[in-house]
Image (cartoon, helix red, strand yellow):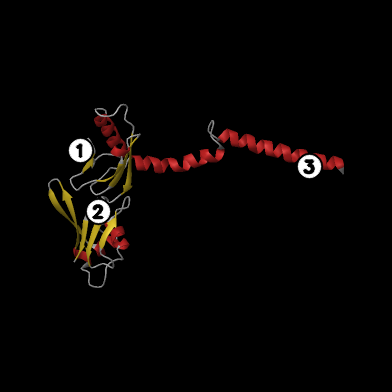
Amino acid sequence: MRTRLMVCLLAVLLSSAVFAQSDKKHAKPGVPATAASAARDTAPAAAADAGYVIGAEDTLNVNVWKEPEMSGTVPVRPDGMISLPLLGDVKAAGSTPMELTTRLISLLKKYVTDPRVTVTVTNVNSRRVYILGQVGRPGAYPLAAEMTVLQALSTAGGLNQFAAADKIYVLRNDPSGQLKLAFQYKQVIKGRKPEQNVLLKPGDTIVIP
């Protein structure tokens, strides 16, 4: 009986050692296996955030290390500028947070030795679309990634009974002027005019007569 108990105990110890060795093989050097898994899971999200382009009406947090009077939360004005102590107006819209960080570091070198800056987008207000007219819930909506006209209409509660379904259009601001893009709802849902179900851009307005 005693011999059998010792054999079982030895088997348990060997099994634990094998699992521990397996975790070490899959973990990054100096990082526990669970932390390595978390890093893999969060990497895509971090990469997506790094590519975000700042727009008008977003809110940014600008932190300058050891310079509290230069740090704080600032809105991006409709003209795309932010206002900062010492620097005055700085163009923010059209840049990623990393690009803006690099620009601020360059500008602050005139006033601060070895400036260390972090820029974070705290509120995303620039990526919106507007849905007007005969839908369940007209108004402004956050623009999700790869959102089409049909998806936006669904988000707004769909067409109501008074909607002129085949007279819907999208108004889009373009460097060449305002564009009017036709959207024939009944044709699109039947798969006949898929090219009209365009990907929406920030600031687009969907009008449902």
Residue at figure coordinates x 25%, y 64% from the top left:
138
Of tags 1 and 2, the one toward the viewer is: 1
x and y percentages locating residue 53 in the rendered image: 28, 42
The quadrant of the rendering that contains the N terminus is top right
**Residue 10, visible in the rendered structure:** yes
Location of residue 151 (image quadrant): bottom left
Say what amino acid the circle numbered 3 marks.
Cys
- Look at 26% across and 28% down and name the residue there: 109
Give percent across and percent down for residue 182.
19, 58
Rendered position, 104 above or below 162: above
Residue pointed to by mark 3? 8
Q: Which of 22 and 70 is in front in this view?
A: 70
Q: Nearer the viewer, residue 51 or 123?
A: 123
Residue at mark 1: 88
Secondary-structure class at tag 1: strand
159, above or below 145, in the image: below
SS assignment at label 3: helix
**Horizontal and vertical percent position of residue 6:** 81, 39
Q: Which of 96 and 63 is in front in this view?
A: 63
